[in-house]
Amino acid sequence: MINFHRTLRAVIQRNLRIPQNSFTRNLSSDESQKKKEKAKLPIVRNPFDNAQQKTKETFVDMVSIFEKRDVHRRNHVEFIYAALKNMEEFGVHTDIEVYKSLIEVMPKGKFIPTNIFQAEFMHYPKQQQCIIDLLEQMEDNGVIPDYEMEAMLMNVFGKRGHPLRKYWRMMYWMPKFKNLSPWPVPNPAPSDIQELATLAVERMCSIDIKSKIEMFHTEEVEDSIDKTWIISGMSEEQSQLLTEHKKPNPIYIEGPSLIWLRNKSVHYFTLRSDPDLEKLEKYKKRQIEDTDDVSKLSTPFFGTMTPPRPSALAKQRSVHEQNDGTIFAICATGTSTKDSLLSWIRLLEKSNPCLSEIPVLFKFKSIVGSNIVPVSTESDKKKPLDLEKIKVV
Amino acid sequence: MIRSRLNVQQKQLFSIFKRTVHQQAETAVDDPKLHHSSTAIQRGKPKIPSKDPLVKNFLVGFVDKQLLAFPEVIPRDDFAKLEKDTWGMVNYFKDSFESTITSQTLNDLKSLGLFGLNIPQLQGGKGYFLSESLLIAEYENISASLGTLFSSHRSVIDVITECGTDLQKEKYLSQLADGSIIATDAIYEIEPTKDDLFNTKATYDVDDHVWILNGEKSFVVNGPTSDLFLVMAQSNPMSLEHEHQICCSIFLLDANTPGVTKESSENKFGDVGVKTCAVSFKNVKLNETNIIGGKMQNHKVGEVYMKYSRLRSSLVQLQLSKKILNHLTSYCINTKQCGTFLKDMDNIKDKIASLLCPIYAVESMIYYTAGMVDEFEDQDVTLETAITKYYSSMTLMKAASCAMEFMGPKALLKGELAEEYFRNAAELFTQGEPIESLRSFIALTGLQHAGVAMQDDVFRSRNPLFNPMHMFKKFIKSSNVDDISTSMGLNEYVHPSLAGPAECIEHCVARLQLCVEMLFNRYGNEIVQRQVEIAKLTEIISTCYAMFSSVSRASRSYCIGLTLSDNELLAATAICLDGKERVKVLAQEIMKGPYLTNDNNLQRMSKQIFKSKHYFIAHPLTYNY
């Protein structure tokens, strides 16, 4: 009997790659013994690895098969760990119903402590830890539990169970964190690239509330090669800064930089110049003002709300004038190619005629090719770029 | 017994005035300049030297007790004569008057001499001074349209008589007097300016020695039929020194000058009688004779203009408020609801009376301020006129909304009198400078004055470690706004029945001074940017002036026994009690600062509104999980 258990553990550990310390202690001390035992016993396979179709349906089916297989539901902890590990592959890692069905695997009533000592010393620690890990995974994936889950946990572990405490803490914090982001992104993030790019540019431009997000089509530019879209963000103030830009100094198209929206990323480019140190120095000088002198207050005149102050009349440093450079515009294009960026400059010229007199240079941080994919999901990222088609600029 | 004591005091007071008048008459002979100005006015009492500004000094905690005597600027004989003169006018407006202004009406008005009320008799006008011309304007203010027409016409005349060159006076005044040309102001613009005061620009052409005017002015009252415009325009900075100063020049401009175009009249909400329109200027060439007030005095000219125009337009507003009150009264008398007349219901009584109070205060302020202008030479009434305008605007809006509360949907039915009043009230409320800017003007003008006086104190308080003795002294005599004691003795200068209200004024002024001190200590000259506190301060300042002028007027009326003057006592008492409570609350808020009051909460919320650019709050029925 002991042998059997050892073997089973060894098999499950191998299949599920569960860290050893969370398992049993005296298990893998003897590798050769393990191998012998393995040969004697039938191999318990991880049902999730062998699934043909990795969908929610098969996942739930497998859980119900496990439930019905025998009355004792042997190895249910191991089964739950195995299931948790494979959830993402089946695309159900954000699905609360699936988590619930996993909890449902636990037998009811058996694990409820009957006295205070059991309650405090973690009655059935392995089972409790298993469900705590399940809840932890839910939390990591941003799945907020519901009240039904509370009832289920109550039935399995009683009201003094540790998983329930974990549940209550989650229910306190998770709703609070859910909407805390000042730049909320729809959940799930849109899969349409263009929509995603608009969201990204909007969020980056929110620093200046007068920013205008425009969508250009490169078809409008006569000699453009790439026919694609450009999402461009620029504000009135940035236009003004561009007209004030000293003509012989070049401005740069810098990028591509990466911005993440949930699990998707967008490449974007900025139009910027080197910092105008002279101007920045001037701003600094103006900030010094004696606030103690109240003998020369000025009054408003004819319909103005506040009187003009010397410092108000002087130009204020704008948020776009940073120490490392002045940012004039941001864009994301459909192809992220050099040609589409050129089209962007041409299109910006319509509302900013001064652009035609300023030299514009490309300053690429990484390889920009003709077919770079501007938006990539995590799975896309793993694929190596097709190096042959990329021209290094 | 009380009476006799009062009489003694009043006699003392009047003797003070008489003495100063006498001195003034003597000096007037020696000083050719003063002599000149007195001939220009021609009628009325000669003016006496100016006093320190009244309301501005409230901010430093000083009340000129002598000014509690309500000014009697029109001599008794003149007053009788004035009544006789205006007899025809009264009848004209009483008989039949329609709100639309036709050429026939204009001719009638010309023959009545209404266009030249405030023009010296030498130039063919009636030569009335401010109080008199306001008194007569009350008759024509039967229509809000005429009121606005005349108030802008006369304000321009006031500017010409006070700041114009002899040439300009000669050129325009006699024509303005007989109504052959009508003047108006062209100041406000529809487009907000970015950095300057005005979008209308005047540039000086050095070669041709002419000014070239470009731009457009909107909301020009009576624009379509006006012949003379008072235009304010942004002009070049005079020198590099004034680079950061806003320079504006003020021009007198004939409507038929080449380059001036009157646009079609604007479609407005109210005031149908008088049309407003936009006037555009395209390369209008002007020479030195068109500039009023010279190069550097434009600020002064602007102030003179604002002084008169504020006062005159608040009179128009007052008349409309009175009309609304009368209309409501008759409505309440004639309307029965479930067996009770409205007039017998306590809440209606309460509302009507609490509408009477601010109207009384506005009337007192207008004639008190005008009296000061007429009584003293070059008296500083900038703040007083601004407060009067502010208070009368607020009162008018209160009256107009009161009608809606009483009458319900009927108040906005087309053809109803209340509806016309409401539209006109809205029109008058928005005419001229915006209320919000008036609000900041009042407090900041006061603070400017107080800042000069309190500079040393503020400097010491803001640098406490360098001035330990000062801080120690302040600590010892520390007083708070909740519980204040004063001993200005204002009650000795009013009728004994008004001793209580006089004490209220004292408390309010004392609280005001504490607030000003606190604000200076807290923000230094950055107070200019604290608009929330500024608005509260404005409320306090204007309440103080309303109380002061009402008490002054009620005291006079009761002492000389005018009809129903006991009710004036009641009105003044009500204004003071109400004002005292309001000032106390506001002063406490200022003392507590933004973090203990609601100010900071509101600031934070508004930040989010602008960040989200819309109403951002989630729907109440939304689920989060």
Image (cartoon, rainbow, N blue to C red):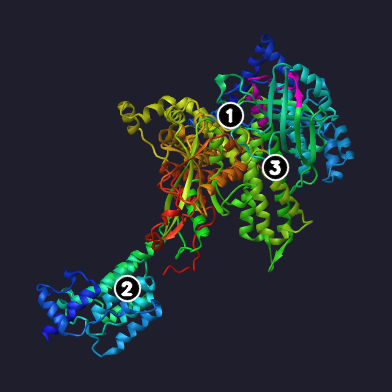
Same-chain status of marks 1 and 3: yes
Give B355 or B599, whichever is nearer the viewer. Answer: B599
Circle 3 sits in a helix, a strand or a loop, which is it?
A: helix
Residue type (three-letter) at the residue carrying disc 1: Leu
What chain does mark 1 sit on? B
**In the displayed structure image, the side of residue B81 where residue A223 appears, left or right:** left
**Is A61 drawn above or below residue A310 in the view shown?**
below
User: Does residue A157 appear anywhere in the picture?
Assistant: no
User: Does residue A222 appear anywhere in the picture?
Assistant: yes
Task: Mark 1 or mark 3: name the one nearer the start of the chain.
Answer: 1
Residue type (three-letter) at the residue carrying disc 2: Asn
Residue topped by disc 1: B67
Residue topped by disc 2: A86
What chain does mark 2 sit on? A
**Residue B2, position as x, y percentages in the image:** 56, 35
Residue type (three-letter) at the residue carrying disc 3: Gln
**In the displayed structure image, the side of residue B428 where residue B464 appears, left or right:** left
**Residue B550, position as x, y percentages in the image:** 61, 39
Q: How many marks?
A: 3
- Please tell me whether residue A169 belongs to the stretch shown in magenta: no
Stretch in magenta = B284-306
- Disc 1 to disc 3, C-alpha distance: 26 Å
Circle 2 sits in a helix, a strand or a loop, which is it?
A: helix
- Disc 1 to disc 2, C-alpha distance: 90 Å
Disc assigned to residue B87: none
